[in-house]
Amino acid sequence: MTSLPHGFAGRVVRWQKTHGRSGLPWQQTRDPYRVWLSEVMLQQTQVATVLGYYERFLERFPDVAALAQASIDDVFGLWSGLGYYSRARNLHRCAQDVVALHGGEFPRSAAQLQSLPGIGRSTAAAVASFCFSEPIAILDGNVKRVLARVLAFDDDLASSANQEKLWTHAQALLPKRNLQDTMPRYTQGLMDLGATVCLVRNPSCLICPVHDQCAAFKLGAPEKYPVKTRKLKRTSQSLWLLLARSGQGYIWLEKRPDSGIWAGLYCLPVFESREALEATDGSDEPLQDGTPFMHVLTHKDLYLHPVSGQFPAAGLERREGAWFSSTEWPKLGLPAPVRKLLAGS
């Protein structure tokens, strides 16, 4: 690894002023509620996808008190389609804690923010940096890549000890002066470099404001960094979904358990096999097998087999669920593949 580059933070700050992103809605505020909401939504999700959800969420829940008072079903309903639903559950719990434990005001330090549900080290640092100008380093995926390349940091980031080393270097590179302005801009600048210039593949090194300070560029091997060897093994699973309709066109939905796949969401009845599904059959007519399809989760491929049939209104009463009309079910928190299946049925 190379030594820390002199003047690095100043270059990032100056570049961000003229070339960084500035038109995103969460960049026009230092309101910690709005910044926190954007940070959570942007985890594992592209900016273009988040924009619409962010605006709709704020329209329904304009502040942390409104979110805290909402039901989890309302939160899931607005989150539906963004995926990674544990984020929505933690978002709701965090809002309730901010109101109950902090009088509706977000703590002003990264250390205190990190004590709240669902706020990890990097998210806490982002909120503290953007909203309160705390000199604290973030280390999300984009920033890890930028700093690992600038420093030619070749320790394996699959190791938590090596990640801690990179955190230490990131902290040492922070601005030292005029923090009220430079900290938010520096933090945004690192994010912008990772998102628009220092890409995973084919980075645009020649237009990077720090390319002459970048050890990986000098070595001619930016794409070798960061180093992370451990990969989670992908698995697969087959599930059968019962698309049960009543004579009036209602759809039967059940709430999933609070843990496991699609936790806490409304869903079609799920079965591990076609035989298990048939064991609950009380339909008015033979069940019809739909076209199986695959849904990709982070580390698992789901092979989903829809089976449809018409049921009497009391036909599924032994199960815990309810009938929902075509105006009701779209407002619920539904897994993306179930929503897509219902929309096309």
Image (tube, grey):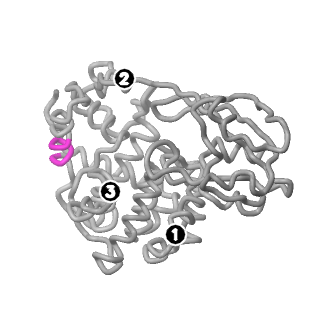
For mark 2, does the 10 Å Cα neighbourhood hold few (<14), some (14 to 19), or many (20 or more) residues?
some
Q: Which residue is mark 3?
A: 119
Upstream in sequence: badge 2 or badge 1: 1
Stretch of the chain drawn in magenta? 167-172
Q: Earlier in the sequence, mark 3 or mark 2?
A: 3
Magenta residues, dominant SS class: helix
Label ID, residue 71 = 1
Residue 103: where, in percent of width, then height? 31, 81
In which image quadrant can residue 92 be found?
A: bottom left
Label 3 CA crowd tier, 10 Å (few <14, some 14–19, many 20+): many
- Residue 96 drawn at (x, y percent): 38, 71
Q: Report the mark closest to the observer, 2 or 1.
A: 1
Q: Position of residue 64 (x, y in %)?
A: 43, 73
Quickly name the residue at label 2: 223
User: Dividing the image into 4 quarters, which one contains the N terminus?
Assistant: top left
The residue shown at (24%, 44%) is 8
> Please, is residue 161 above or below residue 30 in the view?
above
Q: Of tags 3 and 2, which is closer to the observer?
A: 3
Above or below, 230 relative to 267: above
**Percent coordinates x, y for residue 243 in the rendering:** 73, 43
SS at badge 3: loop
Label 2 amino acid? Glu
